[in-house]
Image (cartoon, rainbow, N blue to C red):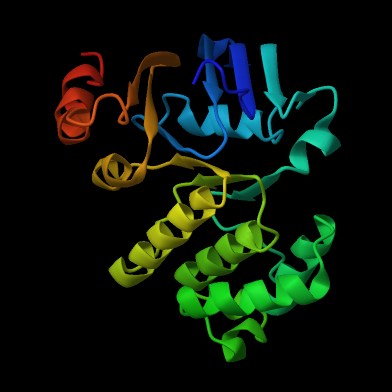
Amino acid sequence: MKDIKPVISIQNLHKSYGKKEVLHGFSLDIYPGEIFSFIGRNGVGKSTTIECMIGIKPFDSGTIKIFDYSIKDDPLKAKAYIGYSSAEPMAYEEMTGISYIRFISSVYKANPNDAYQRMLDLSSRLELSLRDLNRPIREYSHGMQQKVCLIAAMVANPPILVLDEPTVGLDAFTIEQLVSLVREHRERGNTVVLASHNIELVSRIVDRVAIIHEGNLLRIFDFDKEENARKGLPSYFLEHCKEKE
């Protein structure tokens, strides 16, 4: 993909919490029309990388550009390209599901009628009923909150969809629906960035995967070039991402 301009470019990224450096200066590019994944053990830096990438957390040094806009210097322009769903649902619980999704779509200046129809389609696919959408989010189960956050992330059809542990709290049927939606999003020429502990899921659906270990970029697998690596990803991960004794 060297001749294709990346939609996300991370260069020499460093991030510390106090005296502990959790990201040690790695670089990578993510391209249009691909499903890209970060995997790693808990606490190794994958969620921190995503949070720096989308502008939730500041970083110490390096650069992150979204469509050539610096997430540090031009955060509003950079964030306008990103739809995001976090590992833990983050929604305004006093709002109803439908009002929250409409609010998020308005932030991205989506056409209200188009956004409403897309909301109906997404909620049907993810089995969140119109009756539930009209209830306050505080009454939702964890899985329902996850669904409404996923719908909000996708409703404006963002060029970059970032999903951090999106399958937590979802049943097997809903996970398969989400997989279909992610693939359809990619087929429209968009980019999907996924962080997940579910290595089997990652190896099944992504185009490339970055293994983060102890704040370093251990390896990037390109499954278009290394198709057999899909089957070998779990064993590679278990062998090379052991905790230090």
Q: Is residue 227 above or below residue 190?
A: above
Q: Quick one: which residue is furthest to the bottom in this view?
A: 131
Q: Quadrant of residue 44?
A: top left
Q: Quadrant of residue 16?
A: top right
Q: Which residue occupies 61% across, 80% down?
A: 120
Q: Which residue occupies 27% across, 40% down?
A: 203
Q: Is residue 36 above or below residue 84?
A: above
Q: Is residue 120 above or below residue 3?
A: below
Q: Position of residue 166 (x, y in %)?
A: 46, 53
Badge count: 0
Q: Position of residue 187 (x, y in %)?
A: 49, 51
Q: Which residue occupies 72% across, 77% down?
A: 116
The quadrant of the rendering that contains the C terminus is top left
Residue 95 is at least partly visible in this image: no
Q: Position of residue 218 (x, y in %)?
A: 35, 14
Comparing 194 with 91, the one in front is 194
Comparing 241 with 200, the one in front is 200
Q: Quadrant of residue 169?
A: bottom left
Residue 80 is at least partly visible in this image: yes
Q: Which residue occupies 83% across, 36% down?
A: 77
Comparing 1 with 167, the one in front is 1
Q: Position of residue 52 (x, y in %)?
A: 64, 28
Answer left or right for 92 relative to 172. right
